[in-house]
Amino acid sequence: MEDLNEIWTEKYRPKKIAELSGQKNIKERLQAFANEKSIPHLLFAGTAGIGKTTCALALAKEIYGDNWHKNFMETNASDERGINVVRTTIKDFARVKPFGAEFKIVFLDECDALTPEAQQALRRTMEKYTKTTRFILSCNYSSKLIPPIQSRCAIFRFRPLEDEDIKESLTKITKNEGLELTDSGTDAILAVAEGDMRKAVNTLQSVAITSKKITNDEVYSIAASLRPEEVKEILELALNNQFMESRKKLANIMLVRGLSGIDVIKGLHKQIIEIDIDETKKAILIDKLGEYEFRIVEGGTEDLQMEAFLAQVSTLSN
Ligand SMILES: Nc1ncnc2c1ncn2[C@@H]1O[C@H](COP(=O)(O)OP(=O)(O)O)[C@@H](O)[C@H]1O
Ligand SMILES: [Mg+2]
């Protein structure tokens, strides 16, 4: 029987490298390693939800087959105290001989959370056990890693997924789950996900709990996310000197729907870039937006700051 509580990001996680959507170059390079059943230390860099962990798991499965979990350890540098992970957990695993293979794999996620000292310890461990253990390090920013670690690894830069890649996965899942994915629903999920497959799949599953038909209305009500059209409307009202009306719509979004000032700023940023106004105005708006973002980050009251921003926009109206 189907487990209704099963998390789709696990259920639909590709088991083979070739099954991932997009990431073409990365897949080709990794497949070559998988075929050789041999890897150097690897460094996976990139934002969340784009296949780093999936590739590490798939690589292990392709190299070791059914016994993969005996030779593979996944650990997170930010969960536990980073230095302890390196000093004990990883060392204990690395010390034990590989099971019917040349080497084992340690997958260390979020390694850019390690302090420089912990990174030094990691580097020493990598060197000491290099005959029997390969490291796959995963991080958001490779620049946060000390150069001696970077230089010991083959670096893979993962990119946010293209809309087409996400569509491909969404189509597979909706077909298998017997859902109807409308075009508007697809566009809404893509807008919410912003290249992050985990976000896309989680959004789809949340919507599917209440509706077999996936439309933009359902997506936006679940995702507590801003619709591009509504941000555009707020911006246009302010630009047309309808400050009070614009402010009312903003209040509805922030107070009633509970979106943060930073969410609104991100939405506005996209719209300002896309909207049809002259370049000088665009530049002024982006500059102002940066200023208000700073104020919010520094602790300014969010709704007041956003109102003040709209007031500024109104002064630019024709
Ligand atoms: N390129 C991809 N093709 C198909 N599914 C993907 C892809 N990238 C991520 N996913 C899915 O998104 C979720 C998160 O992926 P994961 O590899 O854990 O991301 P991260 O880069 O944060 O490690 C998983 O369910 C995975 O199946
Ligand atoms: Mg991951």
Image (tube, grey):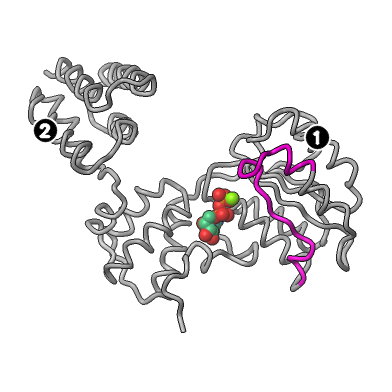
Residue at the spot x=35%, y=54% of the render?
189
Magenta-drawn stretch contains 239: no
Residue at the spot x=45%, y=80% of the render?
2
Dot 2 crowding, Cα within 10 Å, few <14, some 14–19, many 20+: few
Q: Is residue 161 left or right of residue 228?
A: right
Dot 1 crowding, Cα within 10 Å, few <14, some 14–19, many 20+: some
User: For the magenta stretch, what is the residue range?
Assistant: 67-87
In this figure, which residue is indicated by the disc labeled 2? 248
Q: Amino acid at mark 1?
A: Ala
Q: Amino acid at mark 2?
A: Lys
Mark 1: which secondary structure?
helix
Rendered-image quadrant of the C terminus = top left
Q: Give the Cα distance between marks 2 and 1.
A: 55 Å
The reply to whether residue 21 is in sight is no
Q: Is residue 69 left or right of residue 277?
A: right
Disc number for residue 121: 1
Residue 290 position within the rendered picture, expressed as x and y whole percent measured from the top left:
36, 20
Magenta-drawn stretch contains 68: yes
- First reached walking from the N terminus: tag 2 or tag 1: 1
Q: Quadrant of residue 175?
A: bottom left
| Marks 2, 1: nearer the viewer | 1
Residue 96 position within the rendered picture, expressed as x and y whole percent measured from the top left:
88, 57
- On screen, 260 above or below 171? above
